[in-house]
Image: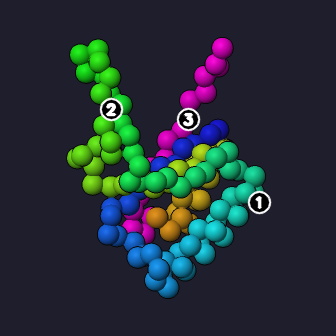
């Protein structure tokens, strides 16, 4: 089963870039990412540029394009993973090890599979 993990944080929380704490966290991310690859469970993973967001909505039948995330959102989506694991317990075991749980959140969603013609 594929699971989508959406990693978020509130700006200003977590280690500040350029500090020893930030470098220590980056080492932790590299280690867990390598473990995920070694286990063969990664379908996709990537960091995201939080300041380069574009949102598209339709209002009265016309598309409206807005730069930036939803204004009312206090958390920033900074990364995602798609993991192929047997069940939610296995996903939770990996998510609990990710540094983001200490200052942000990890939303987990089972993915639906549809045939594309």
41 with respect to 18 (left or right): right
Determine whether the residue tagged by mark 1 lies in a helix, strand or loop: helix
- Badge 2: how crowded within 10 Å, few (<14), some, or many (20+)? few
User: Can you identify the residue that label 1 sits on?
Assistant: 38
Q: Quadrant of residue 12?
A: bottom left
92 with respect to 104 (left or right): right
Query: Which part of the image, by quadrant, shows the N terminus?
Result: top right
Chain-order first, disc 3 or disc 2: 2
Chain-order first, disc 1 or disc 2: 1
**Where 82 falls versus 56 (above or below)?**
below
Q: Which residues lie in the magenta part?
A: 101-117
| Residue 111 numbered mark, or none | 3
Frontmost residue, 64 versus 29: 64
Q: Quadrant of residue 105?
A: bottom left
Q: Is residue 109 visible?
A: yes
Q: Is residue 85 visible?
A: no
Between circles 3 and 2, the one closer to the viewer is 2
Chain-order first, disc 3 or disc 1: 1
Residue at 49% across, 52% down: 48
User: Can you identify the residue that label 2 sits on?
Assistant: 65
């Amino acid at each position: 089963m594929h699971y989508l993990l959406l990693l978020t944080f509130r700006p200003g929380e977590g280690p500040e870039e350029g500090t020893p704490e930030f470098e220590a966290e980056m080492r932790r991310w590299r280690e867990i990412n390598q473990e995920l690859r070694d286990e063969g469970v990664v379908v996709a993973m990537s960091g995201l540029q939080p300041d380069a967001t574009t949102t598209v909505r339709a209002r009265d039948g016309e598309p409206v394009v807005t730069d930036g995330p939803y204004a009312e959102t206090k958390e920033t989506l900074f990364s995602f993973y798609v993991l192929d694991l047997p069940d939610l317990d296995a996903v939770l075991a990996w998510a609990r090890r990710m540094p983001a749980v200490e200052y942000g959140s990890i939303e987990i969603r089972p993915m639906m599979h549809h045939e594309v013609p």
